[in-house]
């Protein structure tokens, strides 16, 4: 897997969760602000399980409490293996394991572009697919 610089020049950490860009700043500081004084990196399997549980419990990740989404983004930032995640609960999902998951790693330039689009109220699924997921599917994707 190609590795990209995950932090902006000002040290901010940007994470894409489904259709939302989240600026977690310093992931450890963010987790402490959320009440997790002993926060440390978690493995990819635990991260996936947390995201699946959040998406399943709320019916969609977008419906999960903002603090849950922010914590999930901060844990992604701590791990450094992915900065993009898609958690989709299909209709009729009966357990958290039914939630489909996709993880990706996009360069900071793409993440900054998506954050700018979100701030302008223009971020949408088509833009995210074009900038993140379709590139991840392309042969020799960067």
Image (tube, rainbow, N blue to C red):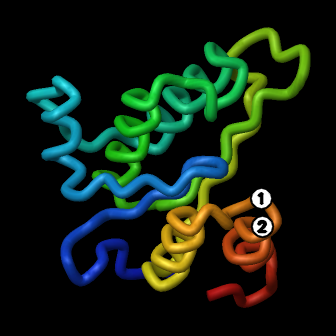
- Kindly identify which residue carries mark 2: 129
Residue visible at 36% across and 61% down?
A: 80
Report the residue that reaches farthest toward the left: 37
Position in image of residue 105 (x %, y %): 54, 68
Specify whether 55 is left or right of 124.
Answer: left
Q: Is residue 77 above or below residue 67?
A: below
Residue 26 bears which disc, if any?
Answer: none
**Could you tell me which quadrant the N terminus lies in?**
bottom right
Residue visible at 49% across and 27% down?
A: 50
SS for tag 2? helix
Position in image of residue 36 (x %, y %): 17, 26
SS for tag 1? helix
Specify whether 111 is left or right of 35.
Answer: right
Give the number of the mark in front: 2 or 1: 1
Mark 2 vs 1: CB contact within 8 A? yes
Q: Is residue 88 above or below residue 127?
A: above
Give the class, few, some or many, for how many residues have Cα within 10 Å of label 2's Cα (few <14, many ≥20).
few
- Kindly identify which residue carries mark 1: 125
Q: Is residue 69 visible?
A: yes
Image mark count: 2
Position in image of residue 71 (x %, y %): 35, 35
Residue visible at 80% across and 82% down?
A: 138
**Could you tell me which quadrant the C terminus lies in?**
bottom right
Q: Is residue 1 visible?
A: no
């Amino acid at each position: 897997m190609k590795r990209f610089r995950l932090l902006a020049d000002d040290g901010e950490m940007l994470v894409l969760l489904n259709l939302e860009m989240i600026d977690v700043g310093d992931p450890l500081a963010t987790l402490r602000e959320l009440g997790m004084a002993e926060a440390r990196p978690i493995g990819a399997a635990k991260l996936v399980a947390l995201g699946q549980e959040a998406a399943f419990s709320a019916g969609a990740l977008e419906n999960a409490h903002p603090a849950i989404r922010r914590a999930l983004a901060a844990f992604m930032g701590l791990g450094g293996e992915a900065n993009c995640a898609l958690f989709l609960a299909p209709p009729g999902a009966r357990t958290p394991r039914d939630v489909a998951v996709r993880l990706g790693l996009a360069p900071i330039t793409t993440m900054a572009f998506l954050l700018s689009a979100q701030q302008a109220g223009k971020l949408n699924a088509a833009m995210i697919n074009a900038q993140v997921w379709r590139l991840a599917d392309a042969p020799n994707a960067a």
